[in-house]
Amino acid sequence: MIVDFWKFENEARLQGFTQVAGIDEAGRGPLAGPVVSGAVILPTGFEAPGINDSKKLTPRKRDQLYDQIREGAIAVGVGLVDNLQIDKINILQAALLSMAQAAGELSPAPDFLLIDGTFTTPATIKQKAIPKGDALSISIAAASIIAKVTRDRIMADFHDRYPEFGFDRHKGYPTKAHKEAIARHGISPIHRLTFKGVKEYV
């Protein structure tokens, strides 16, 4: 089935909205690090061959598309909520907060948000939640790439600080190697203390 990747953007523009932003997050599932959201407003006709849900792309392709999106977008915003705040407000609320932050970073400001998933954000902007939106909307797909690449780079930096955990490889996700590292070394300052697989060691 051929997907019209501009369907939701075009529908919003037909309703009179002019700055339509896609939003997605990366990092709800990991045991460590922040949750990061991307927000992207693309110009009509923007093309980047291969753009898709970031999880379906190789790291090299994501990096290439990240640069193309940064160069060709009308606006790009990033929101970040760290592990301490995640433990305070829970991961869903943290993800939605990071999405609202990302939208707030956009200039020009968006007047309509297309959001990946089933929840809308705390932002006071007209918005639409789209399940599996990162595979249906070019703006959300672009946002997913911004979020994923940004978070992966953050976790690579954390690896330099805490190399014993292997954050450069698993990016904080609950892999066997990560769980074994926690069992061996305990927890780091960036681990999410309320998550199963971590709280047992607090």
Image (tube, helix red, strand yellow):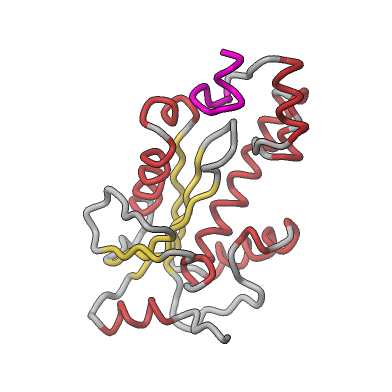
Residue 26 spot, x, y in % from top left:
54, 48
In the displayed structure, would residue 137 be above or below residue 149? below
Residue 196 is one of the magenta-drawn residues? yes
Residue at image coords 65%, 77%: 49
Q: Is residue 50 left or right of residue 110?
A: right
Q: In front here: 196 or 94?
A: 196
The stretch of residues the image draws in magenta is: 190-202
Residue 21 spot, x, y in % from top left:
38, 65
Please identify the quadrant where the C terminus is shown: top right
> Could you say which quadrant of the image residue 111 lies in?
bottom left
Dominant secondary structure, magenta = loop
Q: Is residue 126 left or right of residue 190?
A: left
> Could you say which quadrant of the image residue 51 lies in?
bottom right
Residue 164 spot, x, y in % from top left:
77, 23
Residue at image coords 45%, 63%: 40
In the displayed structure, would residue 103 be above or below residue 198? below
